[in-house]
Image: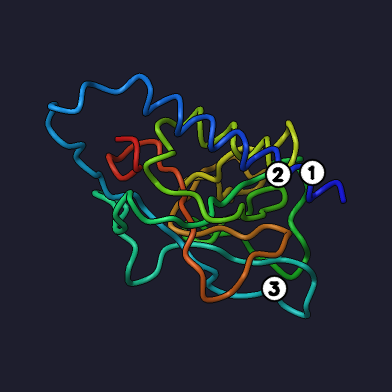
Amino acid sequence: MKLLRRSAAALAALAALILTSSLTSAPAQAAPAIYHAGMTWTVLEKGPYEDGTVRVGADSQTNAYTGDTSADTALPLLCLRDWGTGVPTRITPTYYAGWARGTVAATGPIPGLALTSREVADRLCSLWFGSDWRAAEFHDGRYGTDLELSGGWSFWAYGYVPDNQRFWVAINDQPANPWT
């Protein structure tokens, strides 16, 4: 029931964001909006021994430099709650498959056009799952002796996200977000 209330609240917030942006947009005679592609990831593998972990990341469709999916597409947003958890014994974090120190989950489908900034993406994750959730980011995977190093391209985390699904994922050092 709590999840349903959060989902309804998130949808209402998304509708408000879209309505607000349409009310503040330029007059009808202005040039049409230019859609920017955003980067997407997918589930790469489930955890060993069904321990509740999942590895999400880039595949052959992903373009981390300019985006791979038109912003007028509605996809779930990948969210992360980094609660500082240690690495499960069966996972060895590397640069290309780090440990995100927490849990991932996916929202319902959200048009990339509604993701107008990283702050909006973070806020939508908070609305869906709670105040300590934010949008997952390309570099969230950690590795090294004390997880002091940041990697990229994929990461492990606890959680469940559906197979055969693409997700919006933020990237902080490339113009591959729908809002870039």
Find out whether the residues at labels 1 and 2 contact each other: C-beta distance under 8 Å: yes
Q: Residues within 10 Å of mark 1 (few under 14, many from 20)?
A: few
Residue at 67% x, 35% y is: 126
- Quarter holding residue 106: bottom right
| Spatial CA span between label 2 and label 3 | 31 Å
* Closer-to-camera residue (52/16): 16
Q: Residues within 10 Å of mark 3 (few under 14, many from 20)?
A: some
Secondary element type, mark 3: loop
Secondary element type, mark 2: helix
Left of 130 or right of it: where is 100? left
Q: Earlier in the sequence, mark 2 or mark 3?
A: 2
Residue 139, given in percent of the width and then of the height, sits at 48, 45
* Residue highlighted by disc 3: 47
Q: Quadrant of the C terminus?
A: top left
Residue 157, given in percent of the width and then of the height, sits at 67, 57
Residue 9, given in percent of the width and then of the height, sits at 70, 38
* Residue highlighted by disc 1: 5
Residue at 68% x, 36% y is: 127
Above-or-below relation of 168 to 44 = above
Q: Earlier in the sequence, mark 3 or mark 1?
A: 1
Above-or-below relation of 44 to 131 = below
Above-or-below relation of 131 to 108 = above
The amino acid type of the residue labelled 1 equals Arg
The amino acid type of the residue labelled 2 equals Ala
* Residue highlighted by disc 2: 8
Find out whether the residues at labels 2 and 3 contact each other: C-beta distance under 8 Å: no
The amino acid type of the residue labelled 3 equals Gly
| Spatial CA span between label 1 and label 2 | 5 Å
Extreme-bottom residue of the structure: 49
